[in-house]
Image (cartoon, rainbow, N blue to C red):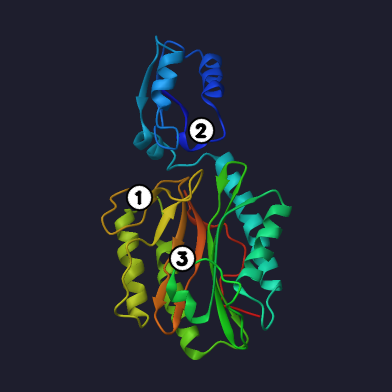
Amino acid sequence: MRAITEAHEVGRASVDALAEAINRLGLAEGVVAVDERGPKRDLLAALAEKFPKARFVPASGLLRNIRAVKMPDEIERITEALRITENGLRAAFAAFSEGVSEKDVQNAFERAVTAEGGRTGFCLVRFGKGLALGQVPASPDIKLGANDFAFFDVGIKYRGYRSDIGRLVSFGEPSDELRFLFDASRSGQQTAIDMMRPGVVAKDVFEAAVQAVRDAGIPSYKRQHVGHGIGIEYYDLPVLTPNARTVLEPGMVFEVETPYYRLGVGGSFIEDTVVVTEAGPSIITTLSRDLTVL
């Protein structure tokens, strides 16, 4: 059984294009695994009509598990997407000035990404206390004030692969509370990263990361996950959850994050891309992981 198609690509590749690939691979009478998810719900039936001697098997779970370990060229594409994203964030930081809006900053990010051939997948920008509101669109009415801070959770698409990165930026000297929350959050993230070696079980990474944030001064800290795979989807497998028994392998690529949200205050956020290698974790993000002060 040979997997040749992913349903999330069907929006760009017609059934005719998939049929051409099946013919080219000599699978017109073979067994073909297909990711059945996506907008074209009759994909399997349409392929079966074109190839009555072939058998098409729904295999989204199988394909997602195969994709959990990346090939070197896939890691290269993820890295390329990440570099464009980092440049977009630098452009967003450069747009900071008193009175600029969340939407203005988002626009600066998206223009920079587009200029390098990327396409924004999501761009969450929140100022100050709005960080605790989560995934709310950037507003043209919320303005940056002196000694304010901003949260970024952004991702793009480039050459079929995704990026995802999170940062906390202070506009002026940060408060002691903001530094404390950031340090606690990053403590958990760094603990998770340090553990990400071949043979380690995903749930153990989760437990250690959450406990590290609690030990750093936020005893009530809770999370559903502290990281997820990335590749041709923003949420590839594996995911670092309390019940995940996946054993980490070289070639797995994760977005590692330990955000914290507190109503009335804001919170903290940091997210980085990590590749599991034979020698241990490799952080491929190059943007500073410190609390950025502008």
Residue that label 3 marks: 135
Q: Position of residue 176 (x, y in %)?
A: 49, 90
Dot 2 amino acid type: Val
The image quadrant of residue 220 is bottom left
Q: Is residue 173 above or below residue 93?
A: below
On-image quarter of the N terminus: top left
Q: Position of residue 55 (x, y in %)?
A: 36, 16
Question: N-terminal of the two: label 3 or label 2?
Answer: 2
Residue that label 1 marks: 199
Residue that label 2 marks: 10
Dot 3 amino acid type: Gln
Write the residue at 62% across / 62% down: 286
Question: N-terminal of the two: label 1 or label 2?
Answer: 2
Q: CA distance from mark 3 to mark 2?
A: 27 Å
Nearer to the camera, 84 or 47? 47
Q: Is residue 215 above or below residue 86?
A: below
Kindly state the secondary structure of the residue where label 3 is placed.
loop
Q: In this rendering, does residue 196 appear at all?
A: no
Question: N-terminal of the two: label 1 or label 3?
Answer: 3
The image quadrant of residue 165 is bottom right
Write the residue at 61% across / 51% down: 81
